[in-house]
Image: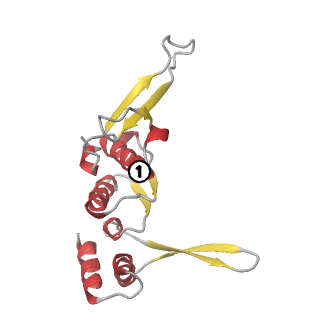
Amino acid sequence: ASVKALSLEHAVFEAVILDAEPSANGSDRCEFRFSSHPSIAREALAKSASGGELSRISLAAAVVNPSAMPSTIIFDEADVGGAVAARVGEKFSELAVEHQVLCITHLAQIAGYADHQWMVSKTASADSVSSSVRALTHEERVREIARMLGGNKIAEAEEMLARKLLKR
């Protein structure tokens, strides 16, 4: 049900025990299999799920059993869009009640759910590349989320929507 709430309504997910006989040490090999639709054959999750699907499956697993998760959970590029992004943001927010959730995203709908937001930037010279991370103030967050929505030229509409996203 948690996967279906993240716009994978027709997905099929299963765990398959690969060893027919129990091993000597009592551990069995298990493979997670996935299909985005019942008409498509289930294959190993790593082989069959896209990056966005894998992010949503991981998020669903964390939401279903949060006590099994570490205190800090990192999601890199939750690759979704539109209404799905809003649902993913909501689930991140739910998970963040008990865990520290770090999410790398370019999506305003997800960033708007964050309690804090950082800007990561890269500087390159002829002989090196360096990255920096800086916490954003509330007004900087408004501008950054507006930029995510509309590009480098921020219009009043994007700024108003960014403020709405941050009020949730």
Tell me how many marks there are.
1
Instruction: Check disc 1 and report the residue beneath it.
Output: 55
- Residue 167 sits in quarter: bottom left
Residue 112: x and y in percent read: 31, 70
As helix, strand or loop, the secondary structure at mark 1 comes to helix
Residue 81: x and y in percent read: 33, 62
Spot the residue most to the front. 39
Residue situated in front as seen by the camera: 118 or 143: 143
Q: In which quarter of the image is the N terminus?
A: top left
Image point (29%, 82%), residue name: 158
Residue situated in front as seen by the camera: 82 or 95: 82
Residue situated in front as seen by the camera: 115 or 51: 51
Residue 150: x and y in percent read: 35, 80
Does residue 131 lie above or below 77 as drawn?
Answer: below
Under mark 1, the amino acid is Ser
Spot the residue most to the right. 127
Does residue 106 lie above or below 95 as drawn?
Answer: below
Does residue 122 lie above or below 14 as drawn?
Answer: below
Does residue 108 lie above or below 9 as drawn?
Answer: below
Residue situated in front as seen by the camera: 78 or 24: 78
Image point (39%, 36%), residue name: 34
Q: In which quarter of the image is the C terminus?
A: bottom left
Is 108 on the left-hand or right-hand side of 128? left
Image point (46%, 72%), residue name: 118
Estimate how packed mark 1 is, as few (under 14), some (14 to 19) or many (20 or more) residues with alpha carbons within 10 Å: some
Residue 42: x and y in percent read: 39, 32
Q: Which colour scheme is used?
A: secondary structure
